Amino acid sequence: MSTKATLELDGKSYELPVVVGSEHEKAVDISQLRNLSGCITLDDGYGNTGSCSSAVTFIDGERGILRYRGIPIEELAEKSTFIETAYLLIYGRLPGRAELRRFSDMLTQNEMIHEDMKHHFEGFPPNAHPMAILSAMINASSCFYPGLMGAVNRERFDVHAARLLSQVRTIAAFSYRKSRGLPIIYPKPTYKYTANFLHMMFSNPFEDYELKPEVARALDLIFLLHADHEQNCSTSTVRMVASSQANLFASAAAGVCALWGPLHGGANQAVIEMLTQIHKEGDDGSKFIAAAKDKNSGKRLMGFGHRVYKNYDPRARIIKAACDSTLKALRISDPLLDIAKKLEEAALKDSYFVERKLYPNVDFYSGIIMRAIGIPTEMFTVIFAIGRMPGWIANFKEIMDDPKSRIYRPRQVYIGATQNPYVPLEERK
């Protein structure tokens, strides 16, 4: 196989290296193209551009494959936990028993946010979106740790990573309580990661939330399945900010802002909004399915299909089973969940959707689970952010550990006005 690609431009030929990844993905290395030819490439939206080399996550959308550090997502979902998977993503390997205990202890030691941060929560209006609060408070939290604010502190990375991963759920829960005018519930050191989050979300000062194992496991699985997903919008944003040597908290806060966009992190919320609209119209889903097949109807089936996966989303297969068992354990009667089951059944059998490979994706089932648990729709993207934090930290660490790392600086093709003289104000029409 040739290790060079030839580009012909203006009668000249340029040889460019071909890079082959560990999973046999090929990429033409154009890093010296501008120096050699004076030209750059144009790839609006970066759909065909590899922005980095990374050892964190592998995706094959055509074959429906997702692996964290080489381990299939199916195996991690069955055998691992969110915290063990977080360690795997951040440090590149599964932890030993002592390492996992130390990591878990660090999370517990850093689960409390500084008490003065309560005053910052009070500054937000009652209707502030939890994602706005989450992003702002992650940044604010960094102010209480002076070691973060200088140059990247490699020696303290373990503490900073544990602090961010632990405190993000505390900030998220406090954000939710603030938005509902409810008293803040502090974390309990005796609870594990996901159970503690549920406690802070739903307990009251006079009564602790009843922790059901099925609920804690389902939410832990949602976190695990969202822990990383290659160079998506938010992860690329984290790497972009980290490349300037901004601290970990600032980089993660930028990732939250990118994730907030409805085209990125809002898909599971859109599923519930779709189901709500169907219910309001008195439909059981049958009319909506028919309308979704009509291009002129303006109806779109949310939570089906995926930009990357041209096959069944491997995470959807896993979470579907968790969804079924969670709903069964909770014995919930919800008309929206009945409509969801109708849509799922119809789409999996209808040739229109099957031929177009519009299978239910992870957002479809995660939205249903979170509604069943009692998590409000405005918190769905926050849950996504908590789950994605290990992947963001892992990608930040790759930037930090790379001795050749430099600040990201994309080019552009300018299409504006050519040189113009300045016209004095009195001469302008």
Image: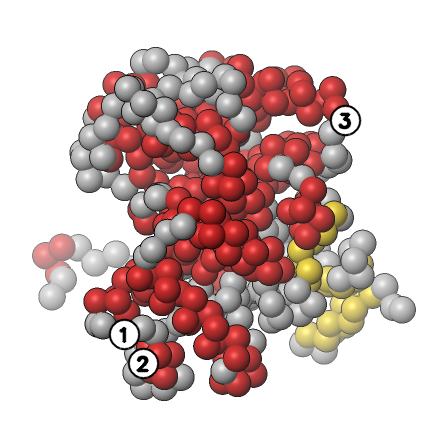
Q: Residue at x 40, y 31 (%)?
A: 210
- Nearest the viewer among 349 and 377 is 349
Q: In the rendered structure, find residue 283 and report the number of the disc placed on it.
A: 1
Q: Position of residue 246 (x, y in %)?
A: 51, 30
Dividing the image into 4 quarters, which one contains the C terminus? bottom left
Give, as a three-letter code, the residue at label 2.
Lys
Of labels 3 and 1, earlier in sequence is 3
Residues 221 and 398: in front is 221
Q: Position of residue 329 (x, y in %)?
A: 47, 47
Q: Name the amino acid, label 3.
A: Gly
> Marks 2 and 3: in contact by CB < 8 Å?
no
Q: Say what amino acid the circle numbered 1 marks.
A: Asp
Give the percent coordinates (x, y) of residue 378: 31, 46
State the SS at label 3.
loop
Distance (Cα) linking label 3 and label 1: 52 Å
Question: Would you name the residue on which mark 2 appears?
Answer: 287
Q: Residue at x 60, y 71 (%)?
A: 310
Spatial CA span between label 3 and label 2:
53 Å
Q: Which residue is mark 3?
A: 96
Confirm or deny contact between disc 2 and disc 1 (CB under 8 A).
yes
